[in-house]
Image: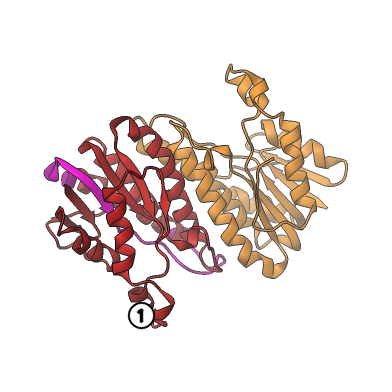
Chain colours: A red, B orange
Amino acid sequence: MKVIVIGATGVIGKEVADAISGQHEVVRVSRNSGDFQADITDKASLEKLFSAAAPFDAVVCCAGGGAFGPLTGLTDQDFDFSLSSKLMGQVNVVRTAMPFIRDGGSITLTSGVLSTQPMPGSAAISLVNCGLEGFARAAALELRDRGVRVNVVSPPWVSETLQMMGQDPSGGMPASEVARAYARLVEDASNGQVISP
Amino acid sequence: MKVIVIGATGVIGKEVADAISGQHEVVRVSRNSGDFQADITDKASLEKLFSAAAPFDAVVCCAGGGAFGPLTGLTDQDFDFSLSSKLMGQVNVVRTAMPFIRDGGSITLTSGVLSTQPMPGSAAISLVNCGLEGFARAAALELRDRGVRVNVVSPPWVSETLQMMGQDPSGGMPASEVARAYARLVEDASNGQVISP
């Protein structure tokens, strides 16, 4: 299969690309490097990516950010950023990939543990993660007419990310282990699922 | 208690205002009528509302819309409308009410059955409903420091709405019955809950 990995230089995306590259042709996409450059907040860049890379069988998106901070401190800009990046950025991925992806293909998106396990400071990110999961479950019902599957991986805290944040990495899951959930969703028959590795 | 009902001329909001007006002082708010006018997509109008109505004990929001339609037909404008109205409109209600609501008060928002039971055509609305529920569960963790509760009612299809859509109203729940869930959340100790009447 030809698999497009968006966010392929990120902590998780790099491991996903590595994990599936033995079995599949991988197109690595990031904002500033890789086989193609695209920014999920820029729909035109995604259209350019997908039309240039077509035909392809799967898209994996491990890109997008959100603002973490106390609700009293989150600004309009924090919400705008969170919604346009990790939420609508990934919605854009689905909408723009649809005309180009092969029938029977799959799209795998990324939410996160704060959807089901919110904490003080996660209001914007919990909104984004839950919104994305709701979108994916609904979108899956429409794309199944073409056999195209839509799923979400909801990663726990990732060891490498915790380390970068100066926290104990043993509280997280290594990115290489998280990556296996994406690889499985690319290859199995799941549809409309939210998977917690 | 003094309870502000936003969307008080809507199918559900009218019943909520009626249901609680026997026990509580109700301030009816809608875009063009009622005791106060405000538009949840306009943060300044909410700030004006809450500063004028303060002090108050509870806010109930039954306002906000979303775009229903096949994913291939939903436009950027459809998503923008859905996100700015039912999703960020209600997030705005929480953010702007926070400085004015009495300690020990409550905020009750509205999602809908399409969060947990998506259907073809509901991609934008399922996103909005799930995103709102995720936001509310997280926001509740922060506002509890002041004893302020945040909850969501996720109404099923409402009989009166089905009738307006030319469909069989017997497939829905009467708005007066849905309203009881809001009244209960204003009065009980629930926090961070999503209630399906």
- Classify residue B32 as left or right of residue A145: right
Residue A127, x across and y down, in percent? 49, 55
* In front of the other: B57 or B163: B163
Residue B111, x across and y down, in percent? 59, 43
**Viewer can see residue A195:** yes
Residue shown at 32%/41% (left/top)? A149
| Residue that badge 1 annotates | A163
Image vertical order of residue B14 relative to residue B132, above or below? above
Q: Secondary structure at mark 1?
A: helix
Residue A157, x across and y down, in percent? 42, 70
**Given the image, what chain letter belongs to the residue carrying mark 1?**
A
Farthest residue, direction right: B22
- Tell me the amino acid under the disc marked 1: Gln
Residue shown at 17%/43% (left/top)? A56
Task: Identify the image quadrant of the C terminus of chain B.
Answer: top right
* In front of the other: A197 or B190: A197
**Viewer can see residue A61:** no
* In front of the other: A170 or A93: A170
Task: Determine if the magenta segment contains residue A194.
Answer: no
Among the 4 quarters of the image, the one containing residue A111: bottom left
Residue shown at 24%/48% (left/top)? A59
* Mark 1 neighbour class, 10 Å CA radius: few under 14, some 14 to 19, many 20 or more: some
Task: Determine if the magenta segment contains residue A55.
Answer: yes
Residue shown at 20%/58% (left/top)? A20
- Classify residue B181 as left or right of residue A20: right
Image vertical order of residue A92 relative to residue A197, above or below? above
- Classify residue A126 as left or right of residue A141: right
Question: Which residues lie in the magenta part?
Answer: A48-77
Residue B162, x across and y down, in percent? 61, 23
Among the 4 quarters of the image, the one containing residue A19: bottom left
